[in-house]
Every structure is written in C-alpha cells, then in structure tokens.
Image (spheres, rainbow, N blue to C red):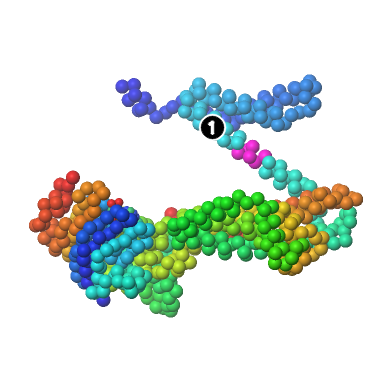
Amino acid sequence: MSKRIEVENLNVFYGKFLAVEGVSLTIEPRTVTAFIGPSGCGKSTLLRTLNRMHEVIPGARVDGRVAIDGKNLYDLDVDPVLVRRQVGMVFQRPNPFPTMSIKENVLAGVKLNNGRISRSDADDLVEKSLKGANLWKEVKDRLDRPGSSLSGGQQQRLCIARAIAVSPDVLLMDEPCSALDPISTLAIEDLIEELKRDYTIVIVTHNMQQASRVSDRTAFFNIAGTGLPGRLIEVDDTATIFERPTEKSTEDYISGRFG
Amino acid sequence: MTLMSEAAVIQGRTLPRGFAWTTLVASIVASAAIFLALALAQVTPEFNVAGAAVVGAILYLVLVGVISRLVEGRRKSIDRVMAGVITAAFLIALIPLISLVATTAADGINRFDMQFFSSSMRNVVGAGGGGLHAIIGTLLVTGAATIISVPVGIMTAIYLVEYGKGRLAKSITFLIDVMTGIPSIVAGLFAFALFALVFGPGIRFGIGGAVALSLLMIPVVVRSTEEMLKLVPNELREASFALGVPKWLTIVKVVLPTAIAGIITGVMISIARIIGETAPLLIIAGLSTSMNYDLFSERMTTLPVFVYTQYTIQGADAQAYIDRAWTGALVLIIIVLLLNLIARIIARVLAPKGSR
Ligand SMILES: Nc1ncnc2c1ncn2[C@@H]1O[C@H](COP(=O)(O)OP(=O)(O)OP(=O)(O)O)[C@@H](O)[C@H]1O
Ligand SMILES: [Mg+2]
C-alpha cells in the first residue's frame, strides 16, 4: 500500500518569496528518505507540499508537479483532505489534542471524521497503532488519561500512533526526534525501521547519525544566502551521500565544515 | 576585584521576618492614636477612620522604605515599598465593591422574603407586593438576548479567526468595534424604531428588549470568543488537517472544544454586561406591574427597570418602595453571582484536562 512520490520542478512560494526552487526527486515505495540541510533551506516547506499541508499557511503556493503513484496532487480535481488521509504527517513538536484521552487521540482520525467504529474494532485499532508506535506497554493501563499527561517523547510516539491509525500510504516526519531524549529517539528510529515495511517514509532531520542510521536515500538541500531560495543539491543512496558525495558542499555539510 | 568579591557574597543583610507586619501594626496604631487625640481635643467632630487608615498607610510606606533602605539597600527597599503600594491599590479598589455589596445586602434584606418572590406589583399600593414579575422578565429577556447573541457572536468570531481575510474581515472587525461603543439608549431606540416600523408605533414587548440587548451583547461575545479562538495553538489545527479532517470538522471538534471554557466565560461576562441594562428596556419593553410570561406580547418589566420605577415613582408609603428597590437590586446581584458560579463549574468540567 505504500506509494511512489515523484516531485518535478517544484517551486514553493510564501507570497512573493520563493522559498524552494526547482526541486525534482523521486521517492520509492517502502523506503526511508532523509532530507538534510542547514536551517532555513526549505526542508519543512518541501515536506509540507507533499501532502498539501502548506496550503494551511496564508499566501503559500507551489508550481510544479508532485505525483503520488502517477497522479498529480495539484490537479484541479484533487481534494487536499483526501490527500492528507493518504499522506500522514508527524510534526516537529508533539501536538496531541488536549481535550482528548490517549485512546481518543489515537482514534482521532476516525472520530474527527465522524466515522463510526465498533467498540471492539476501536480497541483493536488502538492497540495495534500504539504497538506500532512502540507505546503500548507504557500506556496500556491508562488509556483514558489525557494525552497531554504523557512525557514529551511519549507524546511524540502518541502522535505517530495517531498518524498510522488512519493507515496512510506515506508518512512524513518533520524532525520527529528533535525534542526527544536519546532513548526515545532510538525507540522512534526502531519504529521507523519497522514502519518502512508498510509505508513510504520521508523524514527531515538535523542529526547526521540519524539520517545515516535510518534512511535508505538522503537528499541534501542548501541555500546560497539569506533571501535566496533553497535548492536540492543532490540526492542519492545514503551510503553514497555519506561516503562519496558528488558535491563539495554536501561533503562540507556532512563533515561539519560548514559556514 | 571588588566586583568579584561582592559577587561571591550571596548573603545580604535582611530585616527579620515579621518586620513588615510589625511596622504596619505600629503605623496604624500610631496614626489611630493621633486621630483619637484630635477627636478628643474636639478638633475633629468624631474619630476619622478613613483619615487614620490613609495616614497609617503612608506612615507605613515611609517607615518601611527608610528602614529597609538603611538596612537592606536600595533594591529591597523599592521592592517593599512597591509591594505596599500595590496592596494599597488593591484594597482601595476593593472598598467600593465591598461597600456596594454590603449596602445592598443590608438594605435589600428587609424585603427579601417569600412575598417578594411570589407576587407581582399588580394592584399594590404602599407596602407588600413583590418582584416576581421583574425576575421572570429579567430571566426571559436576558435569556432571549443570549439565545440571539451567542450563536451570532460565536459564528462571527469563527468567521473572523478561521475564515476571514482581507476587506470583509477588516470591516466586520471595525463594525464590531463601533458596536461595542454604542450607547445602550441608542440600542433601545433602534429596536423601538425597528419594531415600530413593523408593528406600528407604540409597540412594547419583551422580545424587543431582547433584540436591543443583543445589539449590546453581540460585540462582547464576538470579541471574547475571538480572543479565545486565537489562543488555540495552530499546531492542533495542523494536527487535525494532517489526519485528513476537513476544516469545518476541525473547527467543530478540535478548535471549539479546546476553547470552550474561555468562550463560556466570555458569554457569562457579556450576560453580566447586559442584565443590568435599564434604558433600552424602558423604551421598548416598557413598564408593567403584572406577571407576563409571554415575550411576544404586552409590556415586560425587568429587575433594573423595577428598581428604577420603585425608586423614582414612590407612593404614599415611600419606605416600602425603597425597600423593594433594594431587594430588587440584591436579587439582581445574586442572579449574576449564580450565573458566574454556574459558568465556572461548566468551564471547569469542560476545560482541557491533565496538561502538565
Ligand atoms: N509561514 C511562512 N511564511 C513565510 N516564510 C516562511 C514560512 N515558513 C518558512 N518560511 C521561509 O521559508 C524558508 C524555508 O523555511 P523552512 O521552514 O522550510 O526551513 P527548514 O529547512 O525546515 O529549516 P529548519 O531546519 O530550521 O526547520 C525560510 O527562509 C523561511 O523563512
Ligand atoms: Mg523545519
């Protein structure tokens, strides 16, 4: 059920400001692709265009093509709401719904969409998703406690459980571990390794070790200067990027020699 | 070098624990003694309580400031004096409130009896009678105004925060600001003119009053709801969108529940704002001494209007009218307090739970 993503000549604007220019890349099904690059080079911006989440920001627009299994997301007949049901997203900061319990948070994708689900199906889905997110053991005795009563790392895994509960085909993760301790980070990295079997995953990270540990392919982005658009410098197998990058700037960035 | 050694010291000279309280008591006692002496010496006709309090407070501030400055240094002395000034400001702000409640309670208690709550003023001249018709009127008119204003106000706020952009939203915001400033008498005249156009001149009924009041209430509801909706973090909306939830469901199921406690508080404040209105109701709801349960026909009296008429149109037994006026005011205050209490309970039950 995972899908191929093709990005062609994508430009992203915030109002008049061109934030990302001329990106073309292909993301294969059942792979993990890491986006790396210095702050402000447009990684989050690009990620959000993969499920049309950028449209939530006033003034943001794109031109170019993003196709999922051959269908351009930006065709006129495409409903962004349906796109987001197939392309899930986990954010940098954990954002469980404060009015809902842990269980309700996991079921949010179903419940918020006015979906009906029998009690036993709901319990199964909750257990499956929480197990999938490596959180089941920690919370199985307090599913009715508020989601915001968990620790930051647990909240992030709850958000992942919430995202996979709607069984998307693609999972986008924007620095999912940046607020987490090493142990939770490892838990999430293990999780990504498992999720890879079923989903196409794109992860933004500032952590080089993490990129090299979890990803199959790595895309390096850079920005020539403030006010200039971010560009894709190169994308290749992670091993290649980390051992024999083609571009000098990639090597500099990865080895920490970066201005 | 001196800087280094000073920085290394973390103990400063401090005054003993009870210093502030002792000084306060001493200042008040001293000031009271002075005023007592003045009263005994016949300089002032009697013991001047307010004067003693004011002089005592000033004496305290000066004493604390000077002593603390000498012993503890500049920063702590300023801290102590400012703490004193702020407490004094708080107490001063409290005086009218306490005095108002105390006076109303003391004078209102005379007629705070079963008869007041069980009878109207129909055919009552002099003593007796009651304010049931006004209590019912207040509840009906305010309730109707709330039913009109809350949906309109909340939906306007949702439009402004979640959908509105550009000219239209800006002009609505501007108009809401203008509406906030409308004098209540103008709202009454507007409602009167409106209904006079439809039903002919001389029309008076409760619903007209409700319309006039909702004119005053809507901007308050819009403003407070708007603020509450803006407090809902964008991340929650994004989290919901990312799950493929449409915008309207996100608003109904994520944004509103997160903000509901604040919205209810805002609605309660707006009710408290209009429940005491007199002028517009005098115009469009009119005066009545009898029971009227029907918002849509006949005149209807509310508590503020009841208080006003009891006080201005006193009959032969003036004291009876004045007593009823006070009791009316007391009942009004109690209703507002009860509403506040209910709102707090609702808000507490609905508030997001368990945040760290
Ligand atoms: N909502 C927005 N409105 C206007 N400009 C924005 C907005 N969000 C981001 N930008 C701009 O777009 C550019 C790319 O930002 P983006 O957040 O995608 O960077 P990033 O690579 O994710 O950085 P980081 O690693 O710090 O998260 C930046 O110049 C930023 O200022
Ligand atoms: Mg980012």
Residue at 22 percent across and 48 percent down: it is A225
Amino acid identity at mark 1: Met
Q: Is residue B69 magenta?
A: no
Q: Position of residue A50 (x, y in %)?
A: 28, 65
Q: Which residues are magenta?
A: B90-95
How many dots with numbers? 1
Residue at 68 percent across and 41 percent down: it is B96
Residue B6 appears anywhere in the view: yes
Q: Is residue B92 magenta?
A: yes
Q: Main secondary structure of the magenta part?
A: helix
Q: Nearer the viewer, residue B97 or B76?
A: B97
Compared to residue B225, the image places residue B298 above or below, namely below
Residue A140 appears anywhere in the view: no
Residue at 16 percent across and 57 percent down: it is A233
Q: Position of residue A99 (x, y in %)?
A: 46, 62
Q: Is the distance from the Cβ of mark 1 to the nearest ligand 1 atom less than 8 Å?
A: no
Chain of the residue that carries numbered disc 1 in the rendered image: B
Quarter of the image for the C terminus of chain B: give it: bottom left
Near mark 1 (Cα within 10 A), the count class, few <14, some 14-19 or many ≥20, is some
- Name the image quarter holding residue B135: bottom right
Mark 1 highlights which residue? B82
